[in-house]
Image: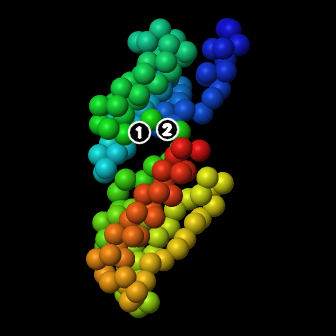
Amino acid sequence: MSKKKKDILLQKHKDIARIDQEEKRTHGWYVRVRFYGKTHSKFFSDKKCGGRYSSLLSAISWRDEIEKAIGKVRTDKHVVTVSNTSTGVVGVRLNEKLNRYEVSWVTTMGKQGKTSVSINKHGKEKALELACEIRKKKEAERLAA
């Protein structure tokens, strides 16, 4: 096997996992792409694709095609698209007790970043707008790095 093939096989590939189950004679790559609460998945068998390397290349190609089709940006960085906050915006939450919107993000160094926008100072609508702008800017910085 060439060095290039070995390098590709040994790399970690986002959303792609190796499955080797001897007892079920199952060997291949499992792709699972999640985006806005929906999961797209497919298994690529070594036997059907012509070997371990070929099945991995098929899996990578399929993952990239699916991401493009559903509008997900191709990156090896983690992207959150579903919000558990009451604002419905990932990384922005309302802190009613302190009367502010709190913004959080992951920095380019992988650390947690936080700030807040006062509702008293800006009003509820404008504070939410500012908080969302901050979050969008910080996420764009991280993905561009």
For image coordinates 42% across by 53% down, the residue present is: 80
What's the mark number on residue 75? Answer: 2
What's the mark number on residue 125? Answer: none
For image coordinates 34% across by 69% down, the residue present is: 129
Note whether 16 is above or below 86 in the view shown. Answer: above
For image coordinates 53% across by 39% down, the residue present is: 76
* Kind of residue at disc 1: Val
Mark 2 is surrounded, within 10 Å at the Cα level, by few (under 14), some (14 to 19) or many (20 or more) other residues, namely: few
- The quarter of the image holding the N terminus is top right
Note whether 96 is above or below 106 in the view shown. Answer: below
Q: Secondary structure at mark 1?
A: loop
Provide residue 106's location: percent of width, then percent of height: 56, 59
**Quarter assignment of residue 89:** bottom left
- The quarter of the image holding the C terminus is top right
For image coordinates 29% across by 37% down, the residue present is: 70
Identify which residue, 64 or 138, lies in the foreground.
138
Left or right: 8 in relation to 78? right
Identify which residue, 131 or 79, lies in the foreground.
131
Q: Which residue lies under the disc numbered 1?
A: 73
Give the spatial CA distance, label 2 vs label 1.
6 Å
Provide residue 90's location: percent of width, then percent of height: 39, 62
Mark 1 is surrounded, within 10 Å at the Cα level, by few (under 14), some (14 to 19) or many (20 or more) other residues, namely: few
Note whether 79 is above or below 91 in the view shown. Answer: above
* Kind of residue at disc 2: Thr
Q: Is residue 106 visible?
A: yes
Q: Is residue 85 visible?
A: no
**Quarter assignment of residue 64:** top left
Identify which residue, 40 or 131, lies in the foreground.
131
| Contact flag, marks 2 and 1 (Cβ < 8 Å) | yes
